[in-house]
Image (tube, rainbow, N blue to C red):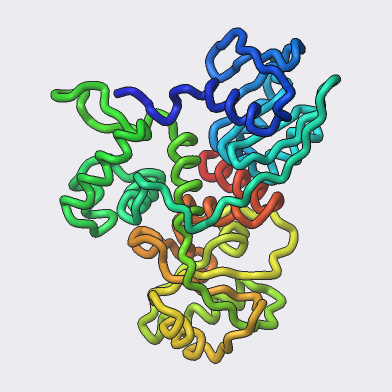
Amino acid sequence: MIDVTRRNTTHRSEAAVAAVLPPSVRIRRGREEGHVIDLELNGKPVSVEWLGEGGLRQARELLARSDERPDVAAARHMSPGARKALSAAGIGWVDETGAAEIALESLIVSRSGHRIKVTQKSRRWSPSVLAVAEALLCGGRATVGAMQETTGLSAGSATNALRTLMELGLIGAEARRGRNSARRIPDHDWLLDAYAAAAASMRPETALTVGVTWRDPATALAETGQRWKNTGISWAATSTVAASVFAPYLTTVSTAEAYVDRKTIAGLEEVAAKADLRPVEGGRLTLRPFPTVTARRLAVVKNGLSLAPWPRVYADLRVVGVRGEEAAEHLRDVIRGR
């Protein structure tokens, strides 16, 4: 099956660069090799390499290479961590939001771009596809039966989700039938990146912040969670607090975020009230509905904390900022045993 998400990356790089240049700059295409394209900007050679989603990991992998680096890195949406790393290394960057920072001998471009709205969801991803991707990243087998058992989805929903992931090229099969027909994940990092980007775009908008005076958010949230559990409320910590248990990295954790088994603001207020917590604008504890069925079903308990599945924690960390991205990549490395 053709991987439609990886085709024409050099064309996307060229288009991203062209979009941020003044009309007076003449662009001429040159050699293309893999994800790299050589352009001439007013006669000056510039190499541009596509970095996919544009996360911190992709930027670090580029910088760790011993071969020749490009003049400019291009991506769908260059993250704050990736921007910082590339700029520090003297490599320009540009993304498809129109943001760019390019400083060449004869050309300087600095643009902030257009903010991507979180509500702008992918046409291919749905809560069911997210749930199946989470289950696969947690080690689930890519069969309809296994996904039904793990996620609780119907046979039809599991089938459609697996089919979508195959069409996106995120899972595949060596053969249509026979011994080699079992689905597999060709690139776990690629699946994780695609999943995390989709999870960020589909993050529950319903949220409630409550006031807490916790000095140790992990311990206090575990105690609060026990009160919820005693009243039959399912919950799971995510983001920085969950990461501090899965893979400690950040020296200080001052806020907490948890998913609970409620879908409305009224339901979230009910959960807060059961723990004697009150809504406060700018509060340090944020409550959100579970985003997928697997975020609840695959939650694990460590140090008294109920923790969302690590791929969901990874996705939530990536939207916290540069330090959150660094913690997310540390979590990925720890889980993969690197």
State the image coordinates of residue 219 (x, y, percent, origin top left): 61, 74
Residue extending furthest top?
Answer: 31
Residue 79: name its quadrant. Answer: top right
- Tell me the residue at 14%/24% (across/down): 177
Q: Quadrant of residue 21?
A: top right
Q: Is residue 256 above or below residue 15?
A: below
* Picture layout, residue 120 above or below residue 47: below
Q: Residue furthest front?
A: 24
Residue 285: x and y in percent read 60, 75
Whether residue 338 appears in this view of the structure is no
Count the marks: how many?
0
Query: For the point 75% across and 15% down, which residue is it?
Result: 42
Residue found at x 62% / y 61%: 240
Is 52 on the left or on the right of 103, as rendered? left
Point 43% across, 52% down: residue: 121
Left or right of 321, for residue 13: left
**Quadrant of the frame with the N terminus:** top left
* Residue farthest to the right, as pictured: 105
Toward the viewer: 157 or 64? 157
From the viewer's side, name the closer residue of 188 and 46: 46
Q: Position of residue 185 (x, y in %)?
A: 36, 33
Q: Is residue 248 left or right of residue 168?
A: right
**In the image, is residue 67 above or below residue 185?**
above
- Picture quarter with the C terminus: top right
Residue 311 position, x and y percent, is 47, 50
Question: In the picture provided, is 9 more to the left or to the right than 74?
Answer: left
Q: Say if residue 5 shows up in the picture.
A: yes
